[in-house]
Amino acid sequence: MIRKILDRLFPHPQLTFFLLLIWLLLVNNLTVGNVVLGLILGVLIPGITQPFWPNRPKVARPIKAAQYILLVLWDICVANVAVARIILFKTNANTHSQWIVVPLDLRSPEAITVLAGTITMTPGTVTAMLSADAQHLLVHCLDTDDPDAVRDEIKHRYERRLKEIFE
C-alpha cells in the first residue's frame, strides 16, 4: 500500500533528486524555502511527464553507470587538452578530419542516445547522424590518421560499457 503511494508520488525518484540538486545549484542559496520549492518541482515535473515515459529504461547496473559517468568526465578532460594542442600547434594542412561509420551492437534507444551524446560531448568528435535502421552512427573526428582505431575505441570504451548498463 505504502509502496504504491510512494511510486505514484515519486514515479522517477532519481529524476526528483537530480531536479532538486539542479534547482539548489541554480539558486545558489541553501534555504528551507529553496529546498521545499526544489522538492515541489522534483515531484511535479516527473509526475506531469510520466505519461510520456511508458517504457522507462531500466539501468541494470547503477554502479557501472556511475563508473561510466566518471570515465566520460575523464575523457572529456583529456580530449579538451588534445583539441587545444591541435588548435594551437597544428596547421590546417596537417589536420586530418575524418567521417567514421560506427556499427552499433546496442539496440536500446536510450543506450544509443547516451552513446551519441557521449561522443558529441567529448571534444574533437561529433555524432552527426543515426542511420534509419539504427544500426550505424556517423561520427566526425577532428583529427585522426586511423579512423578504424577511433571506431574501435568508441566500441570498446563506450558501447561495450553501455551494453552492460542497459541490456
Image: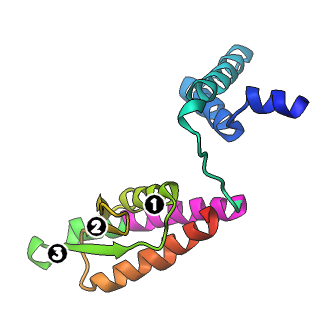
* Residue 80 position by quadrant: bottom left
* Residue 40 position by quadrant: top right
Q: Specify whether 78 is left or right of 47.
A: left
Kindly identify the amino acid type of the residue bearing the numbered disc 1: Ile
Q: Residue at x 82, y 27 (%)?
A: 5
Labels 1 and 3 touching (C-beta < 8 A): no
Pointer 1 residue? 112
State whether residue 16 is above or below residue 159.
above
Q: Nearer the viewer, mark 1 or mark 3?
A: 1
Pointer 2 residue? 138
The magenta span reads 62-80
Q: Is residue 114 magenta?
A: no
Pointer 3 residue? 95
Q: Secondary structure at mark 2?
A: strand
Mark-to-mark CA distance, 3 and 2 = 19 Å
Q: Dot 3, crowdedness within 10 Å: few (<14), some or many (≥20)?
A: some
Q: Secondary structure at mark 1?
A: helix
Kindly identify the amino acid type of the residue bearing the numbered disc 2: Leu
Q: Which mark is residue 153?
A: none
Q: Is residue 65 magenta?
A: yes
Q: Secondary structure at mark 3?
A: loop
Q: Nearer the viewer, residue 20 or 47?
A: 47
Q: Nearer the viewer, residue 88 or 73?
A: 73
